[in-house]
């Protein structure tokens, strides 16, 4: 089998599923964030793959760079929030961070 | 002096005289009422003197207006015969369904309103001096007082119906609070009664105002007086139509409640009995005149055809008020709490009846008598209420049976009281005589028979007044008060009137005596306008129907 | 003298007492006793001026002016007057003014003289009084008002000063207002007067609305030209009678005479001033002043009112025991005489009686004041404060202790009874002659009959009073201890008694018609159309055109144009005189028989008279009748109306509010249950769904993600 579009898509789908699995199942906020990163990266792979095989060309690369920048920014903000949450709660269990509930 | 003042106020003295209290009110809002007792006493004093100062400036301005007033100009329905006119467009809006809304800030005075402006300024000044006895939330009281002042002055100077209505309602609200908060034991009842009664009147007025607006297309009162301005197919167009009669009656009822004319008068005794002294003074001195002023300015001038049609009814209502009020006042000696204030309230009903009788005659003597009676009743009855206030201040009683022999304890007070009481029974040399006799002279020519009945009022009037005078001032002092003065029993203190009370009473007494001996200044001020009004009422229906 | 000076003097006379009032009301308290001297001095000055005016007026003939314009000075006949505008209503001028004619000049003298003497008298009489300055201030105000009535030449000023007289008499009668009786009397006087004034006012309104002016001369002139109220003679009569109503009130005529006896509660000098000479005379003076307007019918009513008054008051006076009340009823009776005289058409005679009566009745009152004052002092010395010092049963024998008072009193009593050689004889006799002539001409015999009967009663009750008070032995300790009073009290008495001698009016002691009084004060021509006058009053117009000019003061009669009435009066003079002397003598004799010689027992006599005595003693029950009808009716009406106002009219208002509140409550319930129910139901349903849906919102991101993925998968499944 040649390494074609399908292979990339399979990798990216696996990566997406792993990320999704992490987001859904982890209770630690850091791990949830890491899952999000995985999902983003899965998308990035898709973009690159379509850039090469699907005729997206340079637009695909541009989109990826946007996503990476966005992910970096998101990570910075999210980690800052996480840090603050930790300072307030002394843990990072997202299920118990529910002060705004009710 | 005059030039100097006019350079300050420019040509907008009416705006100044109307809104000066409002400025004072805003200034007062910025002065916090003191927290503890000492500071509170200080700030209370500031509020009191501020009010006195403002009303005094107002009085000075009124005198200035009086001095610069041109007696020869007529007014009523002629725009350029009004004086101190200011006309600025106020609300210009184009609304769906309603059309263009043209409301002007339009003020000016003629011989009908000028005496009333003078009266309002005088009464407000005197009543502000009488307000020193107010103890409860002083700041609020004076804020309301000044707002009331704005409303009253505004009613008399407005020439735009909408503006008139705004001021009319503006006066209503503070009055409600002034009675309802600072009043006597049944203050809530009295305040709400006053409010609802007057509001019903206002509703009638509002309806007619709207109808007039749709017929004329402007809120300008002067436009409304010209039959040519009415759109041909509008509700109030034409002459002697049913709708015009209905509108006349609705307006008349609205104003009659304020006067008050029997049978719309029952709010008055309650309001007077419960209101604090200065508010009674204003109520009797100024507010009642707004009703008769409205009848002359709006009913007579805008509906001359209906006026001629209902003239007889008006005269009858006037006489009924005179006799009915007098008998009810006399009845207070036998019925109820025998309250001096209630008696004076009924005497007001009787005296305002003369105004109605005089104006219904549509004769120069009667009309001048009516407007003069408005002024004179204002000063005399204000004095009477101030007098009751003086007694009440010292004893916290005002029943007719609670007193006696005050003449010996308070000789100066007795002298001033004599002026007021004799003024009220129409003694020559005091202003009430001139106006009452002019009313009689005018009314007799138009309605000889019913004027004879009105003459009974002078007998009854003398009856209840002298009766009250005897009950309160003559005879022996009751034992509770005849003992030596004890500082711990301040309530039973019966020393003579103090400077403050004299300050309130003497200007009024001077006016009563002055206009009793020399009525010229007052009569000259109003005669041109009133003669013109009579002529207008009598000729304009015929003139207009000939045009049609 | 220039007419301007005369008028100026008149106005100065008017204003001087007002000056007293103004000074004393403001500074009196600080002045104390001095205020009395100030008042007396000013009135003295006033009196001198009045005498001067009288003499000047009677000796000068002022040149007539041709009227140009409506204001300024006008002279017509004997009338000098000034007119000016009080105020103007546009083009309508309210003109007023003052006038002096011979009548006025005489009346000025009467008022100022009596007023001056009363001021003098009060210096002693009122000296213990705490409010002494106030008393003089009121006297000043009263004199001012009274002089105003005298000088007024128009209805408006007449009414103005009329009311001022009313109020100042109110103040004076109620001077001792600590006493309820005094305060009540003052009030009663004012209110009863107001009833009369009501008619007066309506009468004035008739005049003004018909003639458009208040001026007497202008009204007379228009009336002479045939202008009448509503164009009918009937209304002219009514208008005249309405104006006469004012006189009924002020001059205490039947049926409004009830205030005068009560007014005796005032200080005695006040009684002398107000109730003898001035205020009560104002009504008579007013009738004289407007004499030309009365039609024959009106005159007849006036004559009858006067006659009835004279009779009723005389019958009451017989049985009264209060010294001053006897005099009060006597005054009422004499006022009735004056009014009767004017009613029958004897103008000068009526006024003549006013003047003579003023002197001797003032003297009588001041003498009574002298007695009361002396009694009071004696009672004070004896520490007796219970005995009524005014009751004649407590007097007696004062002749010895108070000779000055007694002899003056006796003389003026004779004058009042109409005994020859007194002024009262002249005037009373003239009245009786006039009534007799009137009876002869018209057949109204009842008028002279009452006149003569009252004359007899007058003589009887006056001598009853004199004998009981002054003759015999003192009946109480107090009466024994009395002493004669000093100069300020005795002097006015003596002076007034002196001028009650006949010679001051006519050299002929039997007939005053030849004296200066009748020469100077002449009847004005009637302004009423001839068909409304008594035929016997018509003067035959023989020669001059001037006599058709009917304005007041146009007195161009000569001996040749005497009316039938005047001729008859002359004929009736001597019979009337004889009869009146006889009757007066009889009355006096009767009084002596009963009270001096005690030939009859007075008590037994009164018991025999029974009901008649009671009727008289209780003043014909006038007060009781009025209290039950007019006053009671008014008070009841007022009470009913006040209750009506309180319960019915206010009840309607409160009922309306109740109905409003009730319906508001109903709508409130409806609003709460139905309208709000629906709204709440909707809210509840929404809430239910919300609560259900809320359960799905766990707040966990993971759940949302799973749901999102499931949703995504579902969508993919559906669309692909």
Image: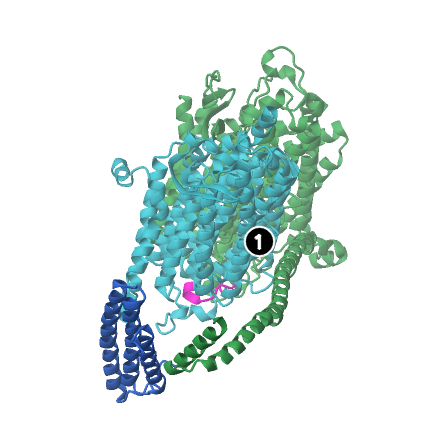
Chain colours: A blue, B cyan, C green
- Quadrant of residue C87 within the rendered picture: top left
Q: Which residue appears farthest toward the bottom when viewing the image?
A: A90
Q: Is residue C521 visible?
A: no
C175 and C456: which one is in front?
A: C175
At x 54%, y 52%, the residue is: B347
Instruction: Name the spot of residue B421 as percent of width and height, x first.
Output: 48, 51
* Residue in front for this viewpoint, B525 or C85: B525
Mark 1 falls within which chain? B
Element type where label 1 sits in the image: loop
Where residue C403 appears, as percent x and y from the top left, is 50, 50
Q: Residue at x 72, y 54 (%)?
A: C615
Q: Looking at the image, can residue B210 be seen?
A: yes
Using the image, determine if residue C192 lies above or below residue B66.
below
Q: Who's the residue at 35% across and 81% down the image?
A: A17
Give percent across and percent down for residue C189: 57, 49
Q: Which residues are magenta?
A: B393-403
The quarter in which the N terminus of chain C is drawn is top left
Of the pair C304 and C607, the residue shown nearer to us: C304
Main SS of the magenta part reads loop
Depicted C91 relative to depicted C472: above or below? above
Q: Quadrant of residue B535?
A: top right
The quadrant where residue B79 appears: top left
Q: Is residue B4 left or right of residue B434?
A: left
Q: Residues within 10 Å of mark 1 (few under 14, many from 20)?
A: many
List the residue tagged with mark 1. Answer: B265
User: Is residue B402 in the magenta section?
Assistant: yes
Nearer to me, C70 or C288: C70
Compared to C548, does C187 lie above or below? Answer: below
């Amino acid at each position: 089998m040649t390494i074609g579009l399908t292979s990339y898509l399979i990798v990216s789908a696996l990566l997406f599923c792993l990320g999704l699995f992490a987001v859904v199942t982890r209770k630690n906020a850091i791990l949830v964030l890491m899952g999000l990163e995985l999902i983003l990266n899965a998308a990035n792979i898709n973009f690159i793959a379509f850039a090469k095989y699907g005729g997206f060309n340079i637009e695909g690369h541009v989109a990826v760079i946007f996503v990476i920048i966005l992910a970096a920014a998101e990570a910075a903000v999210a980690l800052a929030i996480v840090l603050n949450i930790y300072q307030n709660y002394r843990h990072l269990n997202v299920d118990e961070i529910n002060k705004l509930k009710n | 002096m005059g030039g100097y003042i006019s350079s300050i106020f420019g040509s907008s003295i009416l705006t100044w005289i109307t809104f000066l209290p409002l400025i004072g009110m805003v200034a007062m809002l910025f002065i916090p009422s003191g927290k503890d007792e000492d500071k509170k006493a200080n700030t209370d004093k500031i509020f009191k003197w501020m009010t006195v100062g403002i009303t005094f400036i107002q009085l000075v301005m009124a005198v200035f207006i009086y001095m610069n007033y041109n007696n020869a100009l007529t007014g009523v329905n002629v725009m350029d015969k009004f004086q101190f006119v200011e006309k600025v467009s106020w609300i210009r809006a184009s609304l769906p369904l309603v059309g263009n809304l043209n409301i002007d800030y339009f003020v000016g005075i003629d011989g009908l309103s000028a005496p009333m402006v003078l009266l309002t300024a005088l009464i407000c000044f005197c009543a502000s001096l009488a307000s020193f006895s107010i103890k409860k939330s002083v700041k609020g009281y004076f804020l309301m007082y000044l707002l009331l002042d704005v409303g009253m002055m505004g009613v008399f100077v407005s020439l735009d119906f909408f503006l008139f209505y705004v001021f009319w309602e503006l006066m209503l609200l503070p009055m409600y609070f002034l009675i309802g908060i600072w009043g006597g034991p049944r203050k809530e009842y009295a305040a709400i009664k006053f409010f609802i009664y007057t509001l019903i009147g206002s509703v009638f007025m509002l309806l007619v105002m709207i109808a007039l607006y749709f017929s004329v297309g402007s809120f300008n009162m002067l436009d409304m007086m010209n039959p040519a301005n009415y759109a041909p197919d509008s509700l109030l167009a034409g002459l002697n139509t049913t709708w015009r009669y209905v509108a006349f009656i609705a307006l008349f009822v609205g104003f009659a409640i304020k006067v008050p004319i029997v049978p719309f008068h029952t709010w008055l005794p309650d309001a007077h009995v419960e209101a604090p002294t200065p508010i009674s003074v204003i109520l009797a001195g100024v507010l009642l005149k707004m009703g008769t002023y409205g009848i002359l300015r709006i009913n007579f001038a805008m509906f001359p055809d209906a006026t001629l049609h209902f003239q007889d009814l008006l005269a009858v209502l006037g006489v009924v008020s005179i006799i009915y009020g007098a008998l009810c006042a006399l009845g207070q000696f036998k019925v109820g709490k025998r309250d001096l204030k209630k008696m004076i309230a009924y005497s007001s009903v009787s005296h305002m009846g003369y105004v109605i009788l005089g104006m219904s005659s549509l004769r120069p003597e009667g009309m001048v008598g009516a407007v003069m009676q408005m002024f004179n009743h204002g000063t005399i009855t204000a004095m009477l209420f101030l007098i009751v206030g003086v007694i009440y201040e010292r004893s916290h009683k005002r029943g007719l049976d609670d007193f006696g022999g005050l003449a010996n304890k308070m000789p100066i007070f007795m002298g001033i009281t004599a002026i007021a009481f004799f003024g009220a029974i129409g003694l020559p040399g005091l202003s009430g005589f001139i106006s009452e006799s002019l009313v009689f002279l005018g009314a007799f020519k138009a309605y000889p028979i019913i004027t004879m009945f009105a003459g009974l009022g002078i007998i009854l009037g003398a009856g209840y007044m002298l009766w009250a005078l005897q009950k309160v001032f003559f005879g022996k002092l009751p034992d509770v008060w005849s003992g030596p003065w004890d500082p711990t029993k301040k309530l039973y203190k019966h020393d003579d009137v103090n400077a403050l009370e004299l300050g309130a009473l003497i200007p009024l007494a001077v006016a009563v005596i002055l206009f009793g001996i020399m009525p010229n200044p007052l009569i000259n001020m109003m005669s041109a306008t009133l003669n013109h009004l009579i002529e207008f009422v009598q000729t304009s229906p015929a003139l207009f129907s000939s045009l049609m | 003298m220039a007419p301007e000076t005369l008028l100026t003097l008149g106005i100065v006379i008017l204003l001087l007492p007002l000056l007293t009032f103004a000074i004393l009301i403001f500074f009196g308290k600080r002045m104390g006793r001095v205020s009395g001297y100030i008042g007396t001095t000013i009135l003295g000055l006033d009196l001198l001026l009045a005498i001067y005016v009288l003499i000047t007026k009677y000796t000068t003939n002022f040149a007539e002016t041709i009227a140009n314009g409506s204001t300024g000075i006008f002279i017509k006949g004997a009338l000098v007057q000034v007119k000016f505008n009080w105020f103007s209503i546009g083009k309508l001028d309210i003109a007023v003014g003052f006038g002096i004619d011979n009548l006025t000049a005489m009346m000025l003298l009467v008022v100022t003289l009596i007023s001056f003497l009363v001021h003098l008298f009060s210096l002693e009489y009122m000296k213990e009084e705490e409010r002494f300055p106030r008393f003089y201030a009121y006297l000043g105000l009263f004199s001012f008002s009274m002089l105003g009535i005298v000088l007024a030449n128009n209805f408006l000023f007449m009414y103005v000063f009329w009311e001022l007289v009313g109020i100042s008499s109110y103040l004076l009668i109620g001077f001792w207002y600590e006493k309820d009786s005094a305060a009540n009397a003052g009030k009663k006087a004012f209110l009863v007067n107001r009833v009369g004034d009501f008619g007066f006012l309506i009468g004035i309104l008739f005049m003004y609305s018909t003639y458009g002016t208040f001026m007497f001369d202008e009204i007379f002139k228009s009336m002479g030209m045939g202008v009448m109220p509503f164009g009918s003679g009937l209304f002219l009569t009514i208008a005249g009678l309405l104006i006469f109503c004012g006189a009924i009130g002020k001059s205490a005529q039947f049926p409004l005479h009830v205030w005068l006896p009560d007014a005796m509660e005032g200080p005695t000098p006040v009684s002398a001033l107000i109730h003898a000479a001035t205020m009560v005379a104002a009504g008579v003076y007013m009738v004289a002043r407007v004499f030309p307007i009365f039609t024959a019918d009106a005159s007849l009513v006036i004559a009858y009112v006067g006659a009835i008054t004279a009779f009723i008051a005389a019958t009451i006076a017989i049985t009264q025991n209060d010294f001053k009340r006897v005099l009060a009823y006597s005054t009422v009776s004499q006022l009735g005489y004056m009014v009767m005289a004017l009613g029958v058409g004897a103008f000068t005679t009526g006024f003549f009686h006013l003047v003579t009566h003023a002197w001797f009745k003032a003297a009588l009152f001041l003498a009574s004041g002298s007695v009361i004052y002396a009694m009071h002092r004696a009672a004070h010395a004896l520490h007796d404060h219970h005995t009524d010092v005014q009751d004649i049963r407590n007097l007696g024998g004062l002749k010895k202790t108070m000779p000055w008072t007694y002899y003056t009193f006796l003389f003026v009593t004779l004058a009042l009874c109409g005994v020859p050689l007194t002024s009262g004889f002249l005037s009373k006799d003239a009245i009786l002659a006039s009534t007799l002539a009137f009876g002869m001409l018209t057949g109204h015999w009842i008028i002279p009959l009452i006149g003569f009967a009252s004359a007899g009663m007058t003589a009887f009750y006056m001598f009853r009073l004199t004998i009981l008070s002054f003759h015999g032995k003192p009946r109480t300790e107090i009466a024994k201890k009395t002493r004669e009073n000093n100069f300020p009290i005795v002097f006015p008495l003596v002076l007034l008694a002196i001028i009650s001698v006949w010679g001051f009016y006519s050299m002929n002691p039997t007939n005053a018609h030849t004296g200066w009084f009748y020469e100077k004060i002449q009847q004005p021509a009637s302004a009423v159309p001839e068909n409304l006058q008594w035929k016997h009053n018509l003067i035959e117009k023989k020669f001059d055109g001037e006599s058709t000019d009917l304005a007041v003061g146009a007195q161009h009669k000569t001996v040749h144009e005497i009316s039938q009435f005047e001729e008859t009066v002359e004929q009736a003079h001597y019979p009337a005189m004889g009869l009146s002397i006889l009757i007066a003598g009889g009355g006096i004799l009767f009084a002596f028989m009963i009270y001096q010689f005690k030939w009859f027992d007075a008590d037994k006599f009164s018991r025999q008279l029974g009901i008649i005595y009671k009727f008289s003693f209780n003043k014909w029950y006038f007060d009781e009748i009025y209290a039950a009808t007019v006053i009671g009716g008014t008070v009841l009406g007022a009470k009913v109306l006040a209750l009506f106002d309180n319960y019915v009219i206010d009840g309607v208002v409160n009922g309306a509010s109740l109905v409003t509140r009730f319906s508001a409550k109903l709508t409130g319930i409806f609003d709460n249950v139905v309208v709000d129910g629906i709204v709440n139901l909707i809210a509840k349903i929404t809430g239910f769904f919300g609560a259900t849906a809320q359960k799905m919102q766990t707040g966990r991101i993971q759940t949302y993600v799973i749901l999102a993925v499931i949703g995504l998968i579902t969508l993919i499944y559906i669309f692909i």
